[in-house]
Image (cartoon, rainbow, N blue to C red):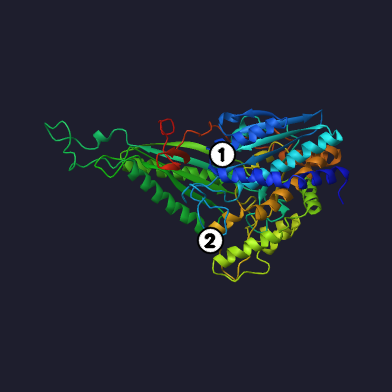
Amino acid sequence: MANDKKAYLIDWIDCRQHKFSRWHGIIWHYAEPAWREYRSAAWYCALLEDLGWDVEKETGGMPTAFRAQWTNGNGPVTGGYAEYDAVPHNCQAASTRPGSRDGLGENAPGHTDPHSALGMGSLAGFLAAQAAMKQYDIPGKLVFFGEPAEKVRGSKPIHAANGYYDGLDAAISFHPFYMMPLCNTVRWDTHCGAGYNLVYTFECNDPQTWLSREAGGPIPAAHAASRAPGANDALMAMYTLSKMNRESIHSTGSCWSMNEAILTAGLATADNLPARTAQINYMIRTSTVEMCETAVAVLDRNADAAAKASHCTWKRTWVAKSRPGLPNHAMAEATYKNLELCGPPAMGSEAVETAREIQKNLGLEPMDAPFFDACSKTIPPKEAEHRLRQLLPDWVTNFTSDDYTEFCWHAPTVRLYISRPMLAPPGPGYAYPPWVMNALGGIPCCIDPTILSAGKTIGCTILDLLTRKALLQRARDEFNKRTGGGVGGDRWMAPLCDYDAPVDLAWPEYVTTARGEHLWCVPAANEGLR
């Protein structure tokens, strides 16, 4: 049973559920990709300023990052955050049929996790805590971060290295459920692992030195002469070499993953002129930092070989170096109790009929209970941990990827999962097309329960951290024990970030032309290429 303060907070969110739903729709439709979340960040900043928060914009040299603070006297400092980056080529409308959002093509970004609900669930919890602190004159400080580019693990290592997480007494991380058994639960021991993200740039700056010209000729016979292989050839060599390495890694069952994406390919057409510049992006997810370093060493050797074979130079640009996560059982226990108090998402009749309509449109027989059964149930943290460990080798201490792990080394941190709407399969082996999951993340009657459950759980946990001194002390004692004395202790891991925010790289972004609003993936200036 909720105490008076928690009952007030829960009711406060319930009375404003339509407002949170409308706000979520704004961010969901903005759907801006990593490092280019201009409208989304501006929206959060404007709202928080209107609600009395002190907002610092462009934190850590990142144009779409921020830190907002609200203080009600001396007391514990609790941190949390919003994410709002979307993913290119996932532009699904909030519809029961496949199709892009109005005015956009399928290659435009869309929210897949969805980070729109992540940010709004966290915001709901922090605003509800602010209201309860005012109502009951609870002393303390709330710190709410805007964290861009999580899909490339971008902002949190930079914030951590620049001291933005210093001084927090506790931190709350929330993510919509994305893999079993992490549904309506909190992580116990096996937190997310290390993650490195980097871009290799190949440049063919001196194509004229590839072959000597014929005697007496000022230029080669333009359409017949052999030209330098150029940057595209370097990129393809890099891709091929690294893909062989990746397949070898995956075949060992070592819980590594490495994915690549081509950011720019040559800045050229199929003329006789060589491609001058090409870029390829790699994301490495492993259990330990040492494993990441090993993978990067292999990639560096591949880049060097590819450049030498194609008459190019190469360089590496860091996007992210994030540390593996750190458990905190005291935080996990308190947060899970609040999840049980507030309850998992409850799908109403409108959501059920919407899900049945999606199934019908896919040619399936609509189910009486169309949602995945786990979406409406909680899983105790120790049980979720046991089920997760059955999938992993004993030596794997951290698993999967998310950069919330940066908070774990600066304050006791909990990782909360609330179920997102997921449809039950009609039979073994059936997989719904990706558009279904993306659409459910934007349909209000389906995604709003996730936001409300997360907001209530987060808000109640903040109240516990502000009013229960013994809880905060247990969390701090555990943090100190795991780090060998807290920040700077003999088992503490310092931030790995030793680079500037890579905002000038050729990340996809919206641009308006005579053809409408499209995606642009090459910057107008050269800052991102040189």
Q: Name which residue lies at 50% across and 54% down.
A: 249
Name the spot of residue 353 as percent of width and height, x first. Answer: 65, 63
Q: Nearer the viewer, residue 108 or 384?
A: 108
Element assignment for label 1: loop
Judge from the rendering whether residue 504 lies leftward or rightward of residue 29; answer left or right: left
| Residue 267: quarter of image | top left
Q: Do labels 1 and 2 touch, CB within 8 Å?
A: no
**Compared with residue 340, is residue 203 higher up or lower down, i.e. above or below?**
above
Residue 507 visible in the snapshot: no
At label 2, the amino acid type is Pro
Which label number is shown at residue 137? none
Name the spot of residue 336 as percent of width and height, x first. Answer: 77, 51
Q: Answer few, some or many: residues within 10 Å of disc 1's Cα (few below 14, many 20 plus, some between 14 and 19).
A: many
- The residue labelled by disc 1 is 154
Name the spot of residue 271 as percent of width and height, x first. Answer: 25, 43
Element assignment for label 2: loop
Q: Name which residue lies at 67% across and 47% down.
A: 21
Name the spot of residue 432 as percent of width and height, x first. Answer: 56, 63
Q: Nearer the viewer, residue 185 or 366?
A: 366
- Nearer the camera: disc 1 or disc 2: 2
Judge from the rendering whether residue 106 lies leftward or rightward of residue 116; answer left or right: left
| Residue 146: quarter of image | top right
Q: Disc 1 to disc 2, how far (Cα)?
A: 28 Å
| Residue 436: quarter of image | bottom right
- The residue labelled by disc 2 is 433
Q: Nearer the viewer, residue 516 or 258?
A: 516
